[in-house]
Amino acid sequence: MRIVLVGPPGAGKGTQAAYLAKNLAIPHISTGDLFRANISQGTELGRRAKTIMDAGQLVPDEVTIDMAKDRMEQPDAAGGFLLDGFPRNVPQAEALDEFLKSEGQQLDAVLDLEVPEDEVVKRIAGRRICRKDSAHVFHVTYSPPKTADVCDACGGELYQRGDDSEETVRTRLDVYHEQTEPIIDHYRAQGLVVTISALGEVADVTERAMAALKQSDES
Ligand code: AMP
């Protein structure tokens, strides 16, 4: 299956993507994670991306699209993939359509995770992420680790993302509404959008998502 995951920052895209990708046996491709890997490796791309990311803005399309295409062309993605954080605006969605067409492929579904805005800010402000595996996500109040700043799953150090401050979250939400939300209409016109609520326990949301994807696959 080829799936795009869309939703505001804090909807739990990274967490859900990790579970869904595992259940569906396809790679989880997160452009945010690819940028963060470049930053920690100190690459030129990472240096370019960091300032933009810290400000909550989008990295320029040409850089992002090339990076996403390179990743989708890796052998492990030949049979499908779950895109998390890409596309993030209409030009990127059009570039993805073009790319898939040239490969003789198409998307199966666009899974839209819905969550109220005040919940998003609460979720992000307390979010702590494992340095070793970004799918290991905690929250200082909602799902605290057993030991402060240590990942329960692998012992990695937990940190707060530089772009998770309340001020940057507001910018990221504005960017989401202005630039990313329009891709939902773009894909709705292709009959690909399935919307689910991202509220509740992580496992319940995964179950909801799997049921919605199954239903869209059958229709
Ligand atoms: P994420 O981990 O998906 O929340 O992404 C973190 C940040 O990386 C975003 O706020 C952007 O600055 C940058 N980023 C990730 N994906 C994209 C994309 N598809 N286009 C432009 N910038 C992106």
Image (cartoon, grey):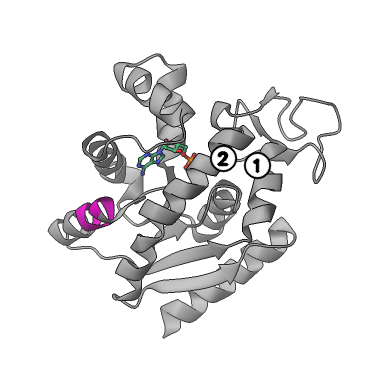
* In magenta stretch: residue 33: no
In the image as oriented, which residue stretches furthest toward the top?
42
Q: Which mark is residue 203?
A: none
On the image, the x and y values in percent for residue 58 come to: 37, 38
On the image, the x and y values in percent for residue 70 come to: 25, 38
Tell me the chief SS of the magenta region: helix
Give the residue displayed 41% in from the left and 22% down from the top: 51
In the image as oriented, which residue stretches furthest toward the bottom?
219
Q: Quadrant of residue 105?
A: bottom left
Q: Quadrant of the N terminus?
A: bottom left
Q: Quadrant of the C terminus?
A: bottom left
What amino acid is at disc 1? Ile
**Secondary structure at numbered mark 1:** helix
Q: Which mark is residue 169?
A: 2
Precedes in sequence: disc 2 or disc 1: 1
Residue 34 shows in this picture: yes
Above or below: residue 82 compared with residue 49:
below
Q: Where ligand 1 lies, by image quadrant?
A: top left
Neighbour class for label 2 at 10 Å: few (<14), some, many (≥20)?
many
Q: Which mark is residue 124?
A: 1
Q: Report the magenta residues as a range.
A: 91-96
Residue 27 shows in this picture: no
Above or below: residue 103 compared with residue 32:
below
Question: Which is more toward the observer, 156 or 10?
Answer: 10
Q: Are marks 2 and 1 in contact (CB under 8 Å)?
A: yes
**Secondary structure at numbered mark 2:** helix
Question: Which is more toward the observer, 93 or 100?
Answer: 93
Question: Which is more toward the observer, 71 or 63?
Answer: 63
On the image, the x and y values in percent for residue 29 come to: 42, 45
Give the residue displayed 43% in from the left and 77% down from the top: 217
Above or below: residue 69 compared with residue 99:
above
In space, the residues marked 2 and 1 are separated at their CA atoms by 7 Å
